[in-house]
Image (spheres, grey):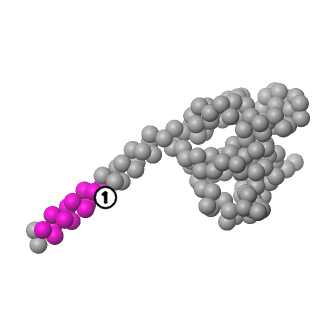
Amino acid sequence: MKKSLAVLAVLTAFVFISCATTAEEEMMKPSIAEIASGDERFETLVAALDAAGLVETLSGEGAFTVFAPTDDAFAKLPEGTVEALLEDIPTLTDILLYHVVDGVVMAEDVVNISSATALNEKEFMVKVDMGKVYINEAQVIITDIEASNGVIHVIDSVILPPM
């Protein structure tokens, strides 16, 4: 009996320590905004988030899934578009929020849905074609970059909300 209680105590301590370690590891992860700010592929995205006042949102608590366009994705837009958007904050904010979903959606879950509603309350399509995942017409090129407040999936194009 004493041996069983000792084993139970050790197992309980192990489970408690494991849970505490997982929570500590989660707290040590950078936020979505910190990850983007520290990655040179997202300089345009970070500038846009800053202009729209969304850095604090993506730094804070919450659970978000961000479909993050790279600088190359922004470069695909017609010349002058990024500059114009930086002057039109309501439109910029709407476009940026179209790239964010409430809650964490990992890659293994994205492939099981056909659409989602973004934070701007507009729907986008999700499709899998020949093993590749697309958000509207943007291809997901990197998945599951975990942050303390969600996950980032990198996309190769900026997605635009329906008018």
Q: Which residues are magenta?
A: 3-16
Q: Looking at the rendering, in which quadrant would you find the N terminus? A: bottom left
Residue 122 appears anywhere in the view? no
Q: Name the residue rendered at 61%, 61% in the picture.
A: 108
Q: Give the percent coordinates (x, y) of residue 2.
A: 10, 68
Q: Is residue 124 left or right of residue 112?
A: right
Three-letter amino acid code at disc 1?
Val
Residue 9: in magenta span = yes
Q: Give the percent coordinates (x, y) of residue 11.
A: 25, 62
Q: Name the residue rendered at 54%, 39% in the picture.
A: 31
Q: Dot 1 surroundings within 10 Å: few (below 14), some, or many (20 or more)?
A: few
Q: Is residue 51 left or right of residue 9?
A: right
Nearer to us in this view, 147 or 95 = 147
Residue 115: in magenta span = no
To which quarter of the image does residue 88 belong?
top right
To which quarter of the image does residue 15 belong?
bottom left
> From this viewpoint, which residue is outermost toward the front?
130
Q: Which residue is mark 1?
A: 15
